[in-house]
Image (cartoon, rainbow, N blue to C red):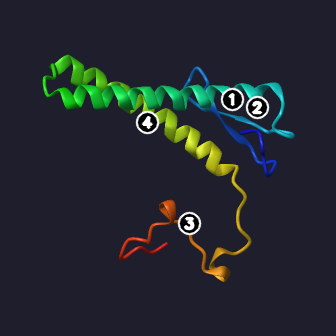
Amino acid sequence: MTDHVHAGPRLLPWTTADGNPCFLFPGDGTGYVSRLADRMEAEQLGSAAVLIEEAERVLSGRAWTAGELQLLTVQLKDSLVVVHRVAESRGARLPVPDDPDKTGDRPTLGGAPEPSGWAP
């Protein structure tokens, strides 16, 4: 994830001690902090994948304890916060099309048709 297109600030996958966002103004995206952030994002996404498998295991068992459900809920929320942060950071680094309305192209999920009533 070191192919940075513009020089805008990168939202880093960690926060300050006070919970405020950390940003990096990258050069070519190959510096130490950029590489560290790339590795940390990869680990966070990997942890989310493991948590999804654990959630599937717990929820398919149909023999949940209140403690299991509470722990799973807290972990899922924490993971969702992290994955959302990674998505925001990566989305902010995507190139902006010149004029998407001029070409009529709109991004869709996996090429699926837009839902009825969809309006940008």
Residue 14, horizontal then vertical, whole percent: 60, 27
Residue furthest toward the right? 27
- Residue at 45%, 75% (x, y): give it: 119
- Residue that mark 1 sits on: 37
Q: CA distance from mark 4 to mark 2?
A: 22 Å
Q: Secondary structure at mark 2?
A: helix
Compare marks 3 and 1 and give the one earlier in the sequence.
Answer: 1
The image shows residue 92 at horizontal and vertical percentages of 66, 50
Q: Which circle marks residue 34 in the picture?
A: 2
Sequence-wise, which precedes: disc 3 or disc 2? Answer: 2
Q: Residue at x 86, y 39 (%)?
A: 27
Dot 4: few (<14), some (14–19), or many (≥20) neighbours within 10 Å? some
Task: Report if the CB atoms under discs 1 and 4 are less than 8 Å apart.
Answer: no
Residue type at the position of mark 2: Ser
Task: Classify residue 99 as left or right of residue 76.
Answer: right
Residue 91 seen anywhere in this rendered image of the structure: yes
